[in-house]
Image (cartoon, rainbow, N blue to C red):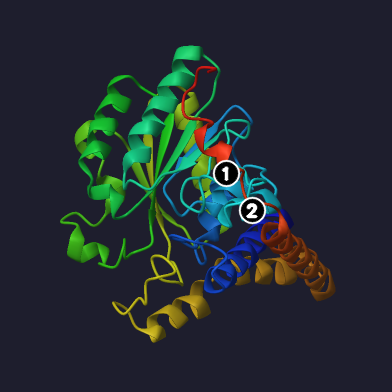
Amino acid sequence: MLKFYEDMLLIRRFEEKAGQLYGLGLIGGFCHLYIGQEAVAVGLQSALTDKDSVITGYRDHGHMLLCGIPPKDVMAELTGRQAGISKGKGGSMHMFSVEHKFYGGHGIVGAQVSLGAGLAFSHKYNGDGGVCLAYFGDGAANQGQVYESFNMAELWKLPIIFVIENNQYAMGTSVNRASSEDQLYRRGESFRIPGLQIDGMDVLAARGAAEEALAWVRAGKGPIILEMKTYRYRGHSMSDPAKYRSRDEVQAVRDKSDPIEHVKKLLIDDHGTKEDELKAIEQTIRKQVNEAADFAESTPEPEPAELYTDVLVEKY
């Protein structure tokens, strides 16, 4: 429980700092923050093994941190520096690390679902026992390639968990205005893929769902869909003023369902954790995030020659 708290708090503080650096002009392009959704990735990825792979869209900073990539390497990537996990060439939306089995944040909406099916095919073909965790949002759930991937994944019984992070608004349109079937866990029914709808604001519910899903997939039964009902507190990206919802709505979710406050209360009330212990964790994480930000501001940008590397798989 304490580890869940630490991981969610790290993502929250990291994202808040990223928002500050974006405001200062140190992060360019787009920047999509994960604030509010932390329980989804923390709960799900806590159940993975080192054989499993992860792929997601462009709201990817938190998922990377959970794959074991140091905060300074992720933050340096955000600021486009040579020391970044993708040598400064990926930025916020396109980070990648084969070593950590994190196969990218992807800017094309829904593209990661087909790539995730490919990763799952690789796991099955190689017989390595791995499972692919493929995240996408409620907006991407209406993309055509998602259903092509569903069909193939079920036909070939691929070891993949399709995770729909339903934060209710996609890019800015509420899910019930954009989707004729807004119960997204049912989207696999015509392909005979089972689905579960989970409270994505509860890290324990997310962990339980991951265990159920992994047991299903590892038993060779094929794919499964997890619809994680969650909520982002910030706009779709840093450039989104989020005028499609009221501040009162956002505050009501924060007050009632904040994933970090929920675990904090459980730790204090049910596990006897002292406030001082939690404050010490907070201070440690703030220090870690501040050091990552300082590193990301001061480390050098890539050399111009870096532009020509990593273009082809072959040596050239």
- The percent position of residue 300, horizontal first and vertical second, equals 68, 52
Q: Nearer the viewer, residue 102 or 160?
A: 102
- Disc 1 marks a residue whose amino acid type is Gln
- The percent position of residue 270, horizontal first and vertical second, equals 72, 66
On screen, residue 164 versus residue 282, left or right, reads: left
Q: Quadrant of residue 150?
A: top left
Q: What number of labels is visible?
A: 2
- Disc 2 marks a residue whose amino acid type is Ala
Q: Residue under circle 1?
A: 45
- Image quarter where the N terminus lies is bottom right
Which element is circle 1 on?
helix
* Residue at the extreme front of the image, as rendered: 304
Residue at the spot x=23%, y=45% of the render? 143
Q: Is residue 300 visible?
A: yes
Q: Quadrant of residue 162?
A: top left
On screen, residue 282 versus residue 60, left or right, reads: right
- Residues packed near mark 2 inside 10 Å, few (<14), some (14 to 19) or many (20 plus): many
Inter-mark Cα distance, 2 to 1: 23 Å
Q: Residue under circle 2?
A: 76
On screen, residue 78 versus residue 137, left or right, reads: right
Q: Quadrant of residue 241?
A: bottom left
Q: Nearer the viewer, residue 113 or 82?
A: 82
Earlier residue among tags 2 and 1: 1
